[in-house]
Amino acid sequence: MKKPGNGGSRQLHVKVKTAKGRKKSSTQWLQRQLNDPFVQKAKEDGYRTRAAYKLIEIDEKFGILKPDTKIIDLGAAPGGWCQVAVKKIKSGKIIGIDLQEIEPIPGVILIQHDFTADDAPEILSKALSGKKADLILSDMAAPACGHAQTDHIRIMGLCEIAFDFAKHNLREGGSFAAKILQGGTEKELLDDMKKCFETVKHFKPESSRKDSAEMYVVAKGFRG
Ligand SMILES: C[S@@+](CC[C@H](N)C(=O)[O-])C[C@H]1O[C@@H](n2cnc3c(N)ncnc32)[C@H](O)[C@@H]1O
C-alpha cells in the first residue's frame, strides 16, 4: 500500500475553530478527521472509510484475502472492508453483517442484523448455503463510551462471540482476524485461540490511530 503523506496524499493542517453549540470533543473529532491522511486517501481511492486500510495492511502482512474464497465480515458498516475484500478475491462469496444498513456493494451480500442475536448464526450460515467460511473477519465495535475499561470489555465481548462463531463456521485451515482492545482480558482469549489455530499473531496497522488501544488478532490454520 502506498502510504499517505509520503509523496502520496497532500499533508493537511486544518485548524477547526470552536463554534457556538459545538462540544469541545466534536471540534477535536472534526479537526482530527480533516487532518487525517488516511481519511484523505480513502476519499481519493473511493473507499467509504479509512478503516479499509486496516484490512489492506492486515492482508499485506498475513495474506488472508485469497482468490475464490468465502468470507464473512462481522460489523461491516459502512463497507470499507467488504470493498477491499471484493476487489481482492475477485470470485467467491462475501457476506457482511451489521446493525446498521449498508449501501449496496456489487458482489457482496449485506445483512442488517444484530450479530449477537440468537438467530444470527443461522442467517449467516444460510447466506453461505450451509457451507463453511474460509475467512471470518470482525471489526465489530460498540460505540465508545470513553471509559477505557468499559470500552475494553465491550469490544472483547464482541470478539469472544465472533471467535465462538468462527469455531463453528470456519473450515479446517481457515483464518480469523478480529479487532481487540488492549486492556487486560485479551490474554485469556488469545490463549484459547492458540488451542484452535496453528498461529495467532497481534498486529497494529499504521492506519490504526496511535492513541487507540485497538489492535487486531490474526489467527491462521484453524484446526477444525
Ligand atoms: C469500526 S466499524 C466497522 C468498519 C468496517 N470494518 C468498515 O470497513 O467499514 C464497527 C461496526 O461494528 C458494528 N457492530 C457493533 N456491534 C454489532 C453487533 N452486535 N452486530 C453487528 N454489528 C455490530 C457497528 O454497527 C459498526 O458499524
Image: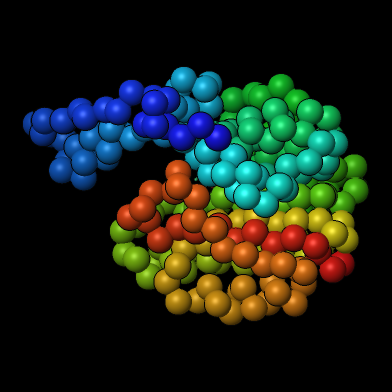
**Quadrant (top left, top right, bottom left, bottom right) of the N terminus:** top right
Q: At which x and y percent is residue 131?
A: 90, 48
Note whether residue 46 is visible.
Answer: yes
Viewer-proximal residue, 134 or 9?
9
Note whether residue 161 is visible.
Answer: no
Q: Give the answer, above or below, for where 202 lies relative to 177.
A: below
**Quadrant (top left, top right, bottom left, bottom right) of the C terminus:** bottom right
Viewer-proximal residue, 136 or 99?
136
Instruction: Give the number of callouts.
Output: 0
- The colour scheme of the drawn protein is rainbow
Q: Quadrant of residue 109?
A: top right
Q: Quadrant of residue 82?
A: top right
Q: Residue furthest front?
A: 7
Q: Is residue 204 left or right of residue 21?
A: right
Q: At which x and y percent is residue 140?
A: 55, 51
Q: Quadrant of residue 150?
A: bottom left
Q: Residue at x 66, y 24 (%)?
A: 105
Q: Residue at x 53, y 73 (%)?
A: 186
Q: Give the answer, above or below, for where 115 lies relative to 220.
A: above
Q: Residue furthest right?
A: 130
Q: Is residue 4 left or right of residue 73?
A: left
Q: At which x and y percent is residue 69?
A: 83, 41
Q: At which x and y percent is residue 212?
A: 37, 56
Q: Is residue 209 left or right of residue 135?
A: left
